[in-house]
Amino acid sequence: MIQLKNVSKIYPNGARALVDVNLNIGKGEFVFLVGPSGAGKSTLIKLLYRDETPTRGQVQINGKNLVRMREREVPYLRRSIGVIFQDFKLLPNKTVHENVAFALEVIGVSKREVRNRTRNMLELVGLAGKEKAFPNELSGGEQQRVCVARAIINNPALLVADEPTGNLDPETAWGIMDLLFNINKRGTTIVMATHARAIVNKMQKRVIAIENGRVARDEEMGGYGYDV
Ligand code: ADP
Ligand code: ADP
């Protein structure tokens, strides 16, 4: 589903974020990206939803070449990819319901369907009853649940997450991981960058370690590594 071929990314300031990365990730996989700060994890994630393009090499998702993709095609790509960030990035002046519904409204879903699907999704992530709250009225865990709802309401084939539990206490983090694992079970491919050692070690999923912009380790049922 995801193919990176000889991908390098050098930022305009000269930072070499990724160096000759080759990766294949299959449909339905759950992949943790680990590695030190500044290793290139966020950059790799950004290539997947075409927030960045590589300096060299090819990025393909479901056979689509993201490097040659035209700007006007990018919105269509993004509809098939859910994105979750460490810092939530919810719209502060919109309610929980509106934040999630927005993702459907922009693709022209009927009002009635938007209402129903949003309600079902908020129930699924355990936020029934919070529809009218604004993001700043929610706990961190609740805000991240809204983000998960927003990211998956279009049934994306791929969900990418950059440190989704980074701002959450361990118990709340496990709640978010439960959601992600259930989403993965239903067939969505997930790529998640994380520093959450305990989560990676417990889950025994594929682990790809990035160090200095290179793939340093790639293990099925791997562990976090970097043990102190
Ligand atoms: P990680 O997510 O593993 O912490 P990043 O992908 O954020 O790593 O960063 C990899 C390298 O690229 C770092 O040296 C970082 O400073 C640099 N970098 C990341 N984003 C940018 C950017 N927008 N402009 C310039 N350099 C960047
Ligand atoms: P995280 O550690 O959560 O991945 P960062 O703090 O590395 O996030 O990056 C935050 C933002 O700053 C990102 O959009 C990234 O592209 C940008 N960034 C990171 N490093 C640099 C850099 N050296 N120069 C310019 N922008 C950067």
Image (cartoon, rainbow, N blue to C red):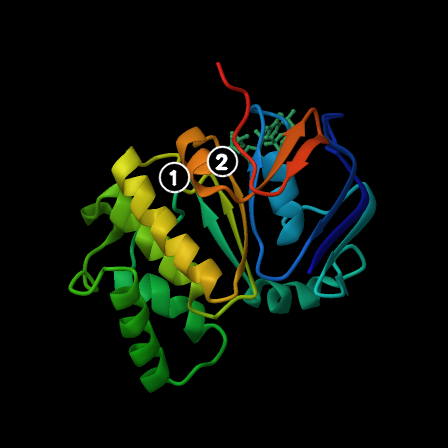
- Ligand 2 in which quarter: top right
> Residue, x 34% and y 76% (percent of image)?
117
Residue 152 in the image, given as x and y percentages of width and height = 44, 64
Residue 39 horizontal side relative to residue 169, left or right: right
Amino acid identity at mark 2? Thr
Q: Earlier in the sequence, mark 2 or mark 1?
A: 1
Q: Nearer the viewer, residue 7 or 68?
A: 7
Q: Tag 1: Cα neighbours inside 10 Å, few (<14), some, or many (≥20)?
A: many
**Callout 2–callout 1 Cβ contact below 8 Å:** yes
Identity of the residue furthest to the left in this view: 129
Task: State which quarter of the image contains the N terminus.
Answer: bottom right
Name the residue carrying label 1: 165
Q: Is residue 54 visible?
A: yes
> Residue, x 50% and y 75% (percent of image)?
107
Residue 16 horizontal side relative to residue 192, left or right: right
Residue 223 horizontal side relative to residue 208, left or right: left
Residue 8 horizontal side relative to residue 40, left or right: right
Q: Is residue 95 visible?
A: no
Name the residue carrying label 2: 194
Residue 41 in the image, given as x and y percentages of width and height = 60, 35
Q: Is residue 63 above or below residue 105?
A: above
Q: Nearer the viewer, residue 61 or 228?
A: 228
Amino acid identity at mark 1? Thr
- Element at badge 2? loop
Q: Tag 2: Cα neighbours inside 10 Å, few (<14), some, or many (≥20)?
A: many
- Element at badge 1? loop
Is the shortest distance between ligand 1 and the CB of mark 2 under 8 Å? no
Q: Quadrant of residue 206?
A: top right
> Residue, x 22% and y 60% (percent of image)?
127
Identity of the residue furthest to the top in this view: 228
